[in-house]
Amino acid sequence: MNAAVAITDPSRSTPGQFDPGTGGYGPGQPHYVAGGPEDERADWREGVPCRLQALDSDAQTLHVTQQIITRQYLLQLPADVPDVQVGHEVTVRSATNDVHLVGAVMFVIDEQHGSERFTRDLILEHNQQRTLEG
């Protein structure tokens, strides 16, 4: 496992404080499931160690005037990681063998289960959008 990720639950994140001067909100506080600053495991302080692998080539869908491109990834975490669920957000913090993944934000779309589990396997979706010209 030569990469690391932080996992958050967007539904439990705290929104930023309202600023009446600007009419907007300040930065919110994410709710970390694993790999956050409050994680007590020393090896998880910089993220949860993991293995991340692209599964298939990208899928392209036309939505109104935008081309939506998605790619699925297999994320393997240590078996004792806290419960990660569909909808949780995964941010890649480090990837020794593919620096282009660092900073990528993906969402859990499937939890893999089995009778003997040596890793916690999840299917992620990475979304990218391009506006069509003309």
Image (cartoon, grey):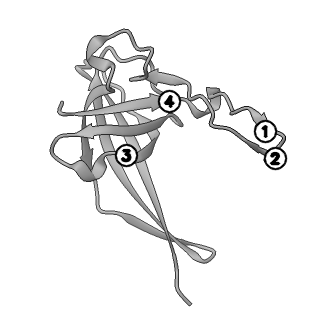
Residues packed near mark 2 inside 10 Å, few (<14), some (14 to 19) or many (20 plus): few
The C terminus: image quadrant: bottom right
Would you say the residues marked 4 and 1 are in contact, meaning their CB atoms lie under 8 Å apart? no
Secondary structure category for the residue under label 2: loop
Would you say the residues marked 4 and 2 are in contact, meaning their CB atoms lie under 8 Å apart? no
In which image quadrant can residue 3 be found?
A: top left
Report the Cα–Cα distance between label 2 and label 3.
29 Å
Q: Front-most of 37 and 86?
A: 37
Viewer can see residue 45: yes
Would you say the residues marked 2 and 3 are in contact, meaning their CB atoms lie under 8 Å apart? no
Amino acid identity at mark 3: Gly
Secondary structure category for the residue under label 4: strand
Residue with the mark numbered 3 = 103
**Which of the two discs, 2 and 3, labels the residue nearer the N terminus?**
2
Residue with the mark numbered 2 = 23
Secondary structure category for the residue under label 1: strand
